[in-house]
Amino acid sequence: MKKILNNLLHRLKEDSLNKRVGNSTREVEYKEKREIKTCLVFWSADTDQNKWFRKLESDFAGVKMDKLCFIPDGIEMLETDDWVAVRNADLGFGGKIRNGRLIAMLGCKYDLFIDLNKETTALIKFVLQHTQASCIVGMKKEGGVADIVIDEVTEPFGLVNKLNVILSGINKY
């Protein structure tokens, strides 16, 4: 019974958040790979991050990388100074976000936002719609928000592999 009530309350919070969701006022800009100086990486805690994160750091050496991790219910992880955790518990009534570090991160401007989430929840969608990043890159998924959608990729490691090739192909005329 308690689980049912918790799910019901969470749905009410998500519905409130969905009603509040409005797009941020950001200008989309596609930069060449060598022009990218700042990056925000967003992933879900249920993915094996060690493999793809090492690849991402080597491909984007010299880029200041901030990290944001969505932690689904039932997964325990301790937040560190290296990355910001986003949990369903950060969602209050009326769709209010109760995570100050998340709000501060969403206010920062980034050259690139890499979305490695396989699914889209109301909270993930809120983050994607309120980032100030110039360009959002992500996998093709229902409800996804991305400026560059990398098709035929279902895992974060596959997206990281293709991302380097795609960004290297962007040229300014």
Image: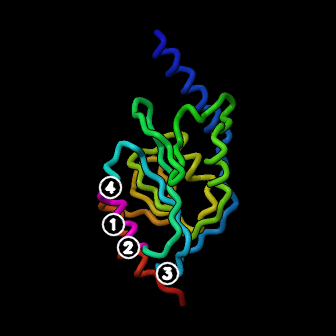
Task: Point out the frontmost of discs 3 and 1.
Answer: 1
CA distance for labels 1 and 4: 9 Å
- What residue is shown at x 46% (from left), y 81% (from top)? 170
The numbered disc on residue 55 is: 1
| Most foreground residue, 54 or 141 | 54
Q: Which residue is mark 3?
A: 32
What crowding class fits label 1: few (fewer than 14 Cα within 10 Å), some (14-19), or many (20 or more)?
some
User: Given the image, on which type of amino acid does mark 4 rest?
Assistant: Asn
CA distance for labels 3 and 1: 19 Å
- What residue is shown at x 65% (from left), y 37% (from top)? 98
- Which mark sits nearer the N-terminus, 3 or 2? 3
- What residue is shown at x 57% (from left), y 70% (from top)? 111
Prevalent SS, magenta region: helix
CA distance for labels 4 and 3: 26 Å
Would you say the residues marked 3 and 1 are in contact, meaning their CB atoms lie under 8 Å apart?
Answer: no
Q: Which residue is mark 2?
A: 59
Secondary structure under the numbered disc 4 in the rendered image = helix
Secondary structure under the numbered disc 3 in the rendered image = loop
Tell me residue 14's x, y (percent). 58, 33
| Most foreground residue, 111 or 30 | 111
Q: Is residue 52 magenta?
A: yes
Q: Is residue 70 magenta?
A: no
Would you say the residues marked 1 and 4 are in contact, meaning their CB atoms lie under 8 Å apart?
Answer: no
The numbered disc on residue 50 is: 4
Task: Point out the frontmost of discs 4 and 3.
Answer: 4
Would you say the residues marked 1 and 2 are in contact, meaning their CB atoms lie under 8 Å apart?
Answer: yes
Tell me residue 116's x, y (percent). 41, 55
- Which mark sits nearer the N-terminus, 2 or 4? 4
Q: Answer above or below: position of 144 versus 52.
A: above
User: Given the image, on which type of amino acid does mark 3 rest?
Assistant: Glu
Q: Answer above or below: position of 45 versus 26.
A: above
Q: Which residues are magenta?
A: 51-60
